[in-house]
Amino acid sequence: MLNNLFSNQIVLGFVQVAIAFVLALLVVLIANRRGIHIEKEVLVSLLRGIVQITVVGSLLLALLKSPTWAGILILLGMFLAAARTAARRAKGVNGAFRASFYGIAIASGVVIGVMSALGVIEYKLLSLVPVGSMIISAAMNSNALALNRFKAEIGSHIGLIETALSLGASPQETVKPYLQASVHASLIPRIDSLRTLGIVWIPGLMTGMVIAGSDPFYAAIYQFVVMAMIFATSGLSAMITMAFIQKEIFSPAEQLLLVTEGKGEGNGKNNGGGMKRNR
Amino acid sequence: MQSDRSSGQDTILKVQDLGYQNDGKVILKDISFDLKLGEHLAVVGSSGSGKSTLLRLLNRLLEPTQGRVVYKGRDYKETPPRELRRKIGLILQQPYLFPGTVADNLRFGPAQRQAEISDEAIAELLSNVDLPDFAGRDVANLSGGEAQRVSIARTLANSPEILLMDEPTSALDEESRLQVEKLLCDIAQRQKLTFIIVTHDMQQAGRLAETALVLEGGRVQQYGPVEEIIHAK
């Protein structure tokens, strides 16, 4: 319908962006009415998203003509930005950025490297950057979920963690159940995506390949390969990040680097206190 | 008043000018006392006086920012933290029990050093806290008083040389409070335990300890025989 009103594609694009913004802001407004305050975060994310993607869109042609080494640099920049974004979900937790960077870089590096070596991803910028970005983005999302859950789990189980420490447990032992729960929670979207691939979700990559003239069967197989890579990266990244973060939240003398909020809350049988801030 | 009682050979814990600051705020300052083998010390003070912080420093869940703690003649930092925490056991105000059975909770401490605790030993520990036949009970079904007694048995399963107790009866009703108090007296007498108990109740301090350390604003206000402190008030 809009296509008939606007003959210029750029103008049409801006009108579509405006409508998409309105829809997103409507959701923010409804959330606000229900006491869910995501106004600033969503607004900033929407603005950043549109600016970033249009800049990349404008530079894409030039980028795709760059040498392969430029692709490595671009991926490195993506690692940093992804680690920073994921770490923000664990604000106040020591070393969240460092742990997240290691997780994303190692997991994405290993998966991209293996897939390039096997020829699944062609070792050229045209393949490396778009497929790499999908993998890094998946690692970022799983890291953000894992870190966010881990922070919440630690914050609501400080009493149990310190009790375990006081009984002579190692720091790793005290946070093990919360770490496992965090990794598991971070993988739920990935597992569900794999489970419903082709039924609930027909991804854009496959559709694009078919439109571009690829064999639909190969496009489907390739899509599955990418999805499996995304799952592998997500799992590996979350586990590596958690392995690093569990060391960061304890001092060398095996003290939890967080303090409890008040005392005497709840019955204390299965939880304990709340997270206040770092010492 | 701060005691300068000299440390004899039977001093198990010597606290020297201990202090703790957090974000520039002084929580504890210049705390000094000796704890003799078999001694029962009550740390008394109002909320925010630093009582709980003191116990957490002694168990090394917190790192002192001033002074030192000498445990059996050596700076306690020379003892690996896990070993130290087993030897200087801590019972918190809230009995944080791990999900599972009572026996699972009692096995937790020894399991950390790859030691096994027999069913007979578990039965004996539970009998000591007046909870016979509770080994297979799910901790989710315990009352507050029962949970606190399991928490005491769990700490004792580590065979600590000193027991630190942070207001172990404050979250309990009157009946449970008296039961746990009596239990602590019995255990201390039977096992000749050295302990430090934190309380805000001077009368309870009189019932459980021979010595009292009164804290106010993170500093020692009084230190000496508990009876003298009670009568001086």
Image: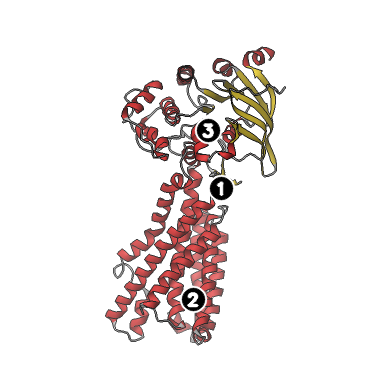
**3 or 2: tag closer to the N-terminus:** 2
Measured as percent of width and height from the top left, residue A95 is found at: 56, 56
Q: Which residue is mark 1?
A: A252
Residue type at mark 1 is Pro
Residue type at mark 2 is Gln
| Residue under disc 1 on the same chain as residue under disc 3 | yes
| Residue under disc 3 on the same chain as residue under disc 2 | yes
Q: Is residue B164 left or right of residue B14?
A: left
- Residue at position x 38%, y 34% in the image: B107
**1 or 3: tag closer to the N-terminus:** 1
Between B181 and B145, which is closer to the camera in this rendering? B181
Q: Classify A184 as above or below B216.
A: below
Find residue B136 and report its image quarter: top left
Measured as percent of width and height from the top left, residue A168 is found at: 47, 38
**1 or 2: tag closer to the N-terminus:** 2
Between A39 and A118, which is closer to the camera in this rendering? A118
Marking on residue A16: 2
Q: Which residue is mark 3?
A: A264
Q: Crowding near pointer 3: few (<14 within 10 Å), some, many (20+)? A: few
Of all residues shown, which one is farthest toward the left?
A217
Query: Mark 1, mark 2: which one is toward the viewer?
Result: 1
Residue type at mark 3 is Gly
- Marks 1 and 3, how far apart at CA: 29 Å
